[in-house]
Amino acid sequence: MSKKIAYFGHDLGYWDDLKKRFINTYHKEQFDFIDLKVDESNVNHSIYELFKFAPNVVYIDIKENDKASIDLARLLKKINFFSMVPVVALVTNVKEVMNLISDHLDFVFVKGVETHDIVYHPFMFKFPEIAESEEFAMGALEKPAPIKLKEIARVGYYGLSSMHVETANKIESGKLIEVEHHLPSDHMATKYFTVLKSGSEDIYYGSRYWLDLEYLYVDPAKKEDGSFSLNVEDLSEDELNKKLKLGKSLKKWVNENASYGSRKRTKLLMVDPDMSYFEDNKKHPDTYDFVFRINEKFDSEFKNITRIMPDIIVYSFPTFNEDTFVDTEDEDDKKKNSNPLSLDEPGKTVDVEGLSESAKKLEAFQRRQDAIFSELITRLKSFGADAPYLIILNCTKYTSKSFQDKYSYQYALVNPNKIGMNVLAQMIHQLEEKRLQKEEQDINAKIAALRKKDPMKYAKVNKTYFDPPKYFVSKKDEMSHALIIRDASLVEISESTCFFTTKEEIGYGNYYLTHPFNFAVKIVPQEGKLSVKEGDTYKYHGLIHAIGEKEKMRLRQFVNDVYTQHKKDEREKEAQEQQEANKRFIEEKEKARLEAEAAASADSESDGEKSSAQETKEKELTEDEKLMQSLEDTASKK
């Protein structure tokens, strides 16, 4: 099967270079390339074209201030169909890098002469078993280098005592974490927050988890062992006063910016196998005054429903196509479902064995849809009072009543035709109006009950007591961006990939590393697993991106220094040994000289002693001779 590669943009020369690299690198593979133009007046049309092409890799060439291309990139990663399709942004500078990565694009590359990573990285992400890379020097650090790993987070709103963020990883309640944020310094004088609670439902930005982070306002007090104390009593008087002042300032800021009208309170999830919304409508899904998500199918175990928590689900019943339908039902299920109930005559069964191949396929198609409905309704019922409305379009098999009766789900509506977005929008607005009225009534009832219980204590209680003010920030505002800081260690690095370790497990996605400078990495599996356990750490494989040509040169130099460090160490060791040998030679030579001089001096002294003895002896002989002469003279006189 051919690999389908799509490109949105106008730089066809650059696109040709990418195509050549694909063909030359993977000459055994077949490729189907397509170049498209972003329809600035109708981004939906571009998405529909891409959906029909069903690409394996998507490149979006984004010019400066190219709003249409950025909208296209952001929207693609919100659609389940493209969740496992690497979407790559090609930019001319690093200005848009952080925003694009925060919108869950898989890779962001600054365009330049080199195209290796631009081809290799998405292939490694999508087809790791066949991805081919050039042989780059991999520098293994002698000792793991302590670095910081920055996890991308998106801020949904700022509350009076905490902020609500979405992240790739769950963090346990009560933990102290470090966060790079955009809160003004006159409201927040620290990067430290504590996790109040976390969850994986009711997600807006498409992350895996949400966290409520409690404001600390000032740095926690440090204990003697260097750890932090969360006990307010351990703060100095000045820090405590500062904390109180900042708290008042932030609460005032939240109250002034709280705008309930800008919050999108109602959520619509549309599931359409044909993705016909993008063919029939020009309106960008994000421009509605309600949250609008579109997928081509329900994901396994209906996890997206839990994550989005929609108020209304619209399911477009698929059209049966005998040519494209593939019966995946195994033999056991076929036996269990043999002779099913007739679709046209209730109470009667169908002799499946006697049907034509075409009719058998239709029966299998209908059974598959019923299985989807059965599992879907079971999941929706688990939400209890929060169970959403289910609207089924383009369905002639059921009426609203027959569907409600069969699946015991009173919130279901069935229509044999499609419904326009204007009608759906009206239904959503009506639902939201009723919900707001009910919420108002519930809050008023609670206030009345409290005042009845204790008129003096609860005399000033109002709506904000039950629904405190929140400042919901626009996704385009820099205040919607944050980074959660973790400790990590860099182990190995090349100019294309790296390996690093953490003490805690982290999930798939993009992260920033801080050494040798800030750059992004996309985590990919190794040995078929997300991480490899090494002692008390987890080792991850990251594909490096989001750097410019200057940073690439710096990275090469760093890798070269690491890679050649052992050679440098060897040379330094050899030089040290030579120096020591030279020193020993000089010392030995000097020692020999001194010994020679000492020996010569000793010989000289010995010769002197002999001469003195001889002189003494000679003197002694002379005296003897004189004595003998004297004796002889005396004898002669006698």
Image: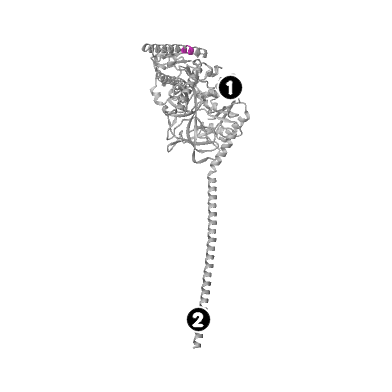
Instruction: Identify the amino acid type marked 2.
Output: Leu
Location of residue 494 (image quadrant): top right
Q: For this rendering, which residue is in front, 508 or 469?
A: 469
Mark in the foreground, 2 or 1 = 2
The magenta stretch spans residue 32: no
Mark yes or no: residue 136 visible.
no
Mark 1 surroundings within 10 Å by alpha-carbon count, few (fewer than 14), some (14 through 19), many (20 or more): some
Mark 2 highlights which residue? Answer: 627
**Residue lying at 60% horizontally and 20% vertically, measured from the top left:** 40
Instruction: Identify the residue at horizontal 51%, vertical 41% (top origin).
Output: 140
Find the magenta span and give its range.
Answer: 427-432
Residue underneath mark 1: 68
Q: CA distance from mark 2 to mark 1?
A: 138 Å
Q: Residue at x 53, y 46 (%)?
A: 569
On the question of residue 169 being in view, the answer is yes
Q: Pick the residue in front: 522 or 173.
A: 173
Residue 245 badge: none
Residue 57 coordinates in the image, percent (x, y): 54, 28
Main secondary structure of the magenta stretch: helix
Q: Secondary structure at mark 1?
A: helix
Outermost residue on the right side: it is 13
Q: Quadrant of residue 107?
A: top right
Q: Nearer the viewer, residue 66 or 178?
A: 178
Residue placed furthest toward the left: 453
In the orientation shown, which residue stands out farthest toward the front? Answer: 637
- Residue 578 on image: x %, y %: 54, 52
